[in-house]
Amino acid sequence: MNDQEIILEFSKRERTVTIIFAIAFGIVGLYIVVNYLTTIYFNPAFPFLISCGLMIYGTYKYYRCPNCNHVPKALGQAGVQMSPESCGDCGKKLR
Ligand SMILES: [Zn+2]
């Protein structure tokens, strides 16, 4: 895979993660709308847990460097770096 293909593949994966995040926020939004407009009561923990789980799953499943398959880490810290310029593990440019 050359540098251009890595950048292209990473942008596709980023788009997938963005869609998953949108769905996760949509679940919370739907909960707020249902809660506001109807008398149906849901425990608010469920939509929040589902959307948090979905975001964590989406990040670790899809948000990976196409070259070395590691999740981009914030430099020197635990956690995921959003919109990284380059991979912290292999140094390949991701955008
Ligand atoms: Zn990498």
Image: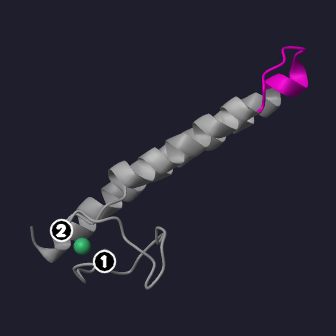
Give the image location of residue 75, x and y in percent.
43, 84
Distance of mark 1 from mark 2, alpha carbons? 9 Å
Give the image location of residue 58, x and y in percent.
43, 47
Q: Label 2 CB, ligand 1: below 8 Å?
A: yes
Amino acid under label 1? Cys
Crowdedness of circle 1 by 10 Å Cα count: few (<14), some, many (20+)?
many
Residue 42 colored magenta?
yes
| Towards the viewer: 29 or 91 | 91
- On the rendered structure, is 4 left or right of 65? left
- On the rendered structure, is 85 left or right of 80? left
Which residue is denoted by mark 1 in the rendering? 87
Quadrant in the rendering for residue 47: top right
Give the image location of residue 6, x and y in percent.
20, 68
- On the rendered structure, is 25 left or right of 71? right
The range drawn in magenta is 34-44
Residue 76 higher or lower than 55, as above or below? below
Give the image location of residue 41, x and y in percent.
84, 18
Quadrant in the rendering for residue 27: top right
**SS type, badge 1:** loop
Which residue is denoted by mark 2 in the rendering? 67
The answer to the question of whether label 1 and label 2 lie on touching residues, with beta carbons closer than 8 A, is yes
Residue 30 colored magenta?
no
